[in-house]
Image (spheres, helix red, strand yellow):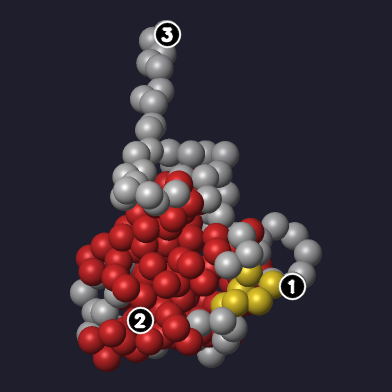
Amino acid sequence: MSRRRPVPRVAVVPRAAGQDHDAAVLDKAARAASAALGAQELVPSALASPFAAAYVAGYARQQSLRNGVDPESRSHGMADLVACLSGLSPAPVASGLQALRFEKREGDGPHRALLRAVGAEADAGYLVGHLESLCGTRMLLAAALSPRPESASAYLTLCDLAADRLQTHQPTASLRFESGERAVLRAAFGA
């Protein structure tokens, strides 16, 4: 039986002169989230939604976790991340990012994020941003904003399809939304 060694994965975090590691990771995460936003074909008016701003924040938070920095666990981490994102985002998203507020997520059980974005639509966007960053797809934001999905269950199926793509490569990982997260998405889409 032939077994190959796994390919080592190395993360490079470029630093500007005098920049600390955490700030460099947040900057790299913000650039990745901005690229993910730009890769999706969106109607400019859709970018003004709280879903879009929170999506970008969730995407960037998951990208920063890949490099060992969790903005949610730092005292002003999410504020620093949102500030990085605001400078790289289009005007409607930047104003939505400045309006974002986070608070501790309630309930028992494992959570994708310790904090929740205030407002059902914003919290759904925050969770979807995490999922899309994990899965490496670039379709969930566009599917949520233009045009709106027919129902929450149709959008949840799309999220499950995005998660299942990676599930085949990492069979022990559980990427699908859990029941509490599904309830957040149902509330956001009015179902």
Answer with the quarter of the image where residue 107 lies. bottom right
Pair 2/1: label in front: 2
In the image, farthest residue toward the front: 18
Where residue 90 appears, x then y in whole percent?
26, 79
**Residue 55 appears in the picture as rendered:** no
Q: Earlier in the sequence, mark 1 or mark 3?
A: 3
**Residue for point 70% across, 57% down:** 110
Give the spatial CA distance, label 1 vs label 3: 48 Å
Where residue 150 appears, x then y in whole percent?
40, 85
Q: Earlier in the sequence, mark 3 or mark 2?
A: 3
Quarter of the image with the C terminus is bottom right
Quarter of the image with the N terminus is top left
Residue holding disc 3: 1
Q: Residues within 10 Å of mark 2 (few under 14, many from 20)?
A: many
Residue 94: image tag:
2
Compare residues 105 and 190 and report the one nearer the observer: 105
Where residue 112 appears, x then y in whole percent?
60, 60
**Residue for point 66% across, 76% down:** 103
What amino acid is at disc 1? Glu
Secondary structure of the residue carrying tag 2 is helix
Q: Residues within 10 Å of mark 1 (few under 14, many from 20)?
A: few
Residue holding disc 1: 106
